[in-house]
Image (cartoon, grey):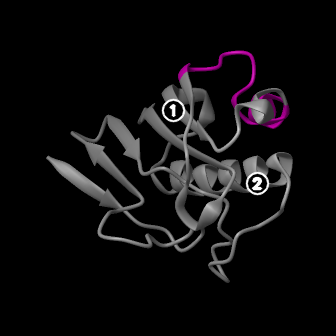
Amino acid sequence: MKTIIKTEKAPLPIGPYNQAVAVQGHLLFTAGQIPLDPVTGQIVGTTIQDQTKQVCENLKAILTASHTDFNHTVKTTVFLKNFNDFGAMNEVYAQYFGEASPARSTVEVARLPKDSLVEIEVVALIP
């Protein structure tokens, strides 16, 4: 059984997809989150640090709506517009994912939605 997750505390999808999908009530897959303000729908920040923080806040809202948190994240994928931002993104990322960080892949891409600098997707357990 799959359950669609939707919260107004994170940006609504800008295409034909959902914020997240829970599978069997135990596993959560989020859509990639970009640094959109959930109220205005506009990109937040111009630096990789500001944008990574907003992305993580959006993910936090989705995780909370799904009754889980960063501690239960098992895998993330990070998409960067510029791999030179890797270190600065990591500084902010570590503040959210902490010592028990999940497995992760990070890739540089040619372009992200709304020309954002970063996009992150999460797979998490629902306890």
Q: Position of residue 105 (x, y in %)?
A: 53, 23
* Vertical placement of residue 26 versus 35, above or below: above
The residue pinned by badge 1 equals 77
- Magenta residue check for 3: no
Q: Amino acid at mark 1?
A: Thr
Determine which residue is flagged by label 2.
Answer: 51
Please tell me whether residue 49 is drawn above or below residue 3 in the rendered image.
above
- For image coordinates 69% across by 51% down, the residue present is 117
Which residue is situated farthest in the bottom direction here? Answer: 40
Query: Pointer 2: residues within 10 angstroms few (<14), some, or many (20+)?
Result: many
At which x and y percent is residue 106? 58, 27
10 or 104, which is in the foreground? Answer: 104
Along the horizontal axis of the image, is 18 left or right of 63? left
Q: Using the image as rendered, state which of residue 85 and residue 78 is in the foreground.
A: 85
Image quarter of the C terminus: top left
Tell me what residue is drawn at x 43 percent, y 34 percent.
123
Q: Is residue 52 above or below residue 5?
A: above
Q: Residue at x 82, y 37 (%)?
A: 92
Q: Which mark is residue 94?
A: none
Disc 1 residue crowd, few under 14, some 14–19, many 20+, Cα 10 Å: some
Q: Give the extent of the magenta segment.
A: 88-104
* Secondary structure under the numbered disc 1 in the rendered image: strand
| SS type, badge 2 | helix
Q: Quadrant of residue 78?
A: top right
Q: Nearer the viewer, residue 111 or 16?
A: 111
Query: CA separation, marks 2 and 1?
Result: 16 Å
The residue located at (33%, 35%) in the rendering is 27
Nearer-the-camera pick, 72 or 82: 82
Amino acid of disc 2: Gln
96 in the magenta segment: yes
